[in-house]
């Protein structure tokens, strides 16, 4: 398997524009996580899905952020409208079983810059 | 709830040992350890599930105390390749939220 695949790897956008980040989890993995990483706040969990269903979105910072998982092989994280403070590296991760007892595999991340 | 990691940063000479600590105010279901190299994704090192457990991976090992509120990562005879930021991740009882500490930046110098 190619691992967790994220696209794009880099995104530069202007403030106010809509941004969509994409993630393809490892085939057969039931759990999918979206994280945001900044120097100030570290790795923050935004939302996680189990079998395509959002389970906990308490980490989503504002209504400007939304995430979907229309099927087992694809998820999106959308920011609309984007703001400079959204600049960060966004990671998607997936796990085969419950993270209580198994590892999470991370994608290479999307570096988002909002100017 | 985010686990608390310490120290924030460590600088070692090759061959020296380091300990990174991770603590929680509540008992955890499990604790994960990951390492992230600059510009790369975090990579899994190990997971501990049982109170009192100790687990090893080459010269990197970890422990989980009996109350399951504290874990430590031990790096013995450090190598240049150990440089990076180490994160502990915690999972509480009743959910699958993998929440990370703020990280410990480890720098190994020759």
Image (tube, coloured by chain):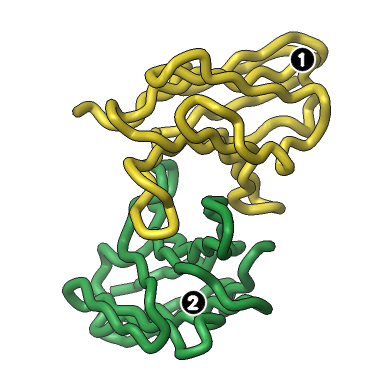
Q: Which color has been applied to chain B in this rendered view?
A: green
Q: Which chain is yellow?
A: A
Report the side of A94 relative to A27 (left or right): right
Assess disc 1: are there few (<14), some (14-19) or many (≥20) residues with their C-alpha within 10 Å of its C-alpha. Answer: some
Circle 2 chain: B
Quadrant location, the N terminus of chain A: top left
Question: Which of the labelled discs sits on residue A80, or is there none?
Answer: 1
B78 left or right, relative to A51: left
Task: Give the number of the disc on residue B92.
Answer: none
The quarter of the picture where the C terminus of chain A appears is top right
A84 lies above or below A98: above
Residue drawn at 77 percent across, 19 percent down: A82
Q: Is residue B27 above or below residue B41?
A: below
Between residues B46 and B67, which one lies in front from this camera angle?
Answer: B67
Q: Are circles 1 and 2 on residues that touch, CB within 8 Å? A: no
User: Looking at the rendering, which quadrant does residue A13 occupy?
Assistant: top right
Residue under the point 73% across and 36% down: A60
- Horizontally, residue A108 falls left or right of residue A38, namely left
Residue depicted at x 38% and y 72%: B49
Give the image location of residue A7, x and y in percent. Answer: 45, 18
**Disc 2 target residue:** B10
Task: Locate residue B99: give its quadrant.
Answer: bottom right
Circle 1 SS class = loop
**Residue A46 on image: x %, y %:** 65, 39
Number of marks: 2
Q: Nearer the viewer, residue A12 or A43?
A: A43
């Amino acid at each position: 398997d190619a691992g967790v695949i994220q696209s794009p790897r880099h995104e530069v956008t202007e403030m106010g524009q809509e941004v969509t980040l994409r993630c393809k989890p490892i085939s057969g993995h039931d759990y999918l996580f979206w994280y945001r990483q900044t120097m100030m706040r570290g790795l923050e969990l935004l939302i996680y899905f189990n079998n395509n269903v959002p389970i906990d979105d308490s980490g989503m910072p504002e209504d400007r952020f939304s995430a979907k998982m229309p099927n087992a092989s694809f998820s999106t994280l959308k920011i609309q409208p984007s703001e400079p403070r959204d600049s960060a590296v966004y990671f998607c991760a997936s796990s085969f079983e419950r993270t209580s007892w198994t590892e999470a595999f991370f994608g290479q991340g999307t570096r988002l810059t909002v100017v | 709830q985010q686990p608390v990691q310490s120290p924030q940063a460590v600088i070692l000479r090759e061959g020296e040992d380091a300990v990174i600590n991770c603590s929680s105010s509540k008992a955890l279901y499990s604790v994960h350890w990951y390492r992230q190299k600059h510009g790369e994704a975090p990579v899994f090192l190990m997971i501990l599930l049982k109170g009192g457990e100790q687990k090893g991976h080459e010269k990197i090992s970890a422990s989980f105390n009996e109350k399951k509120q504290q874990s430590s990562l031990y790096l013995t005879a450090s190598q240049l390749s150990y440089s990076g930021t180490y994160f502990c991740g915690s999972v509480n009882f009743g959910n699958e939220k993998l929440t990370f500490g703020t990280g410990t930046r480890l720098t190994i110098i020759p």
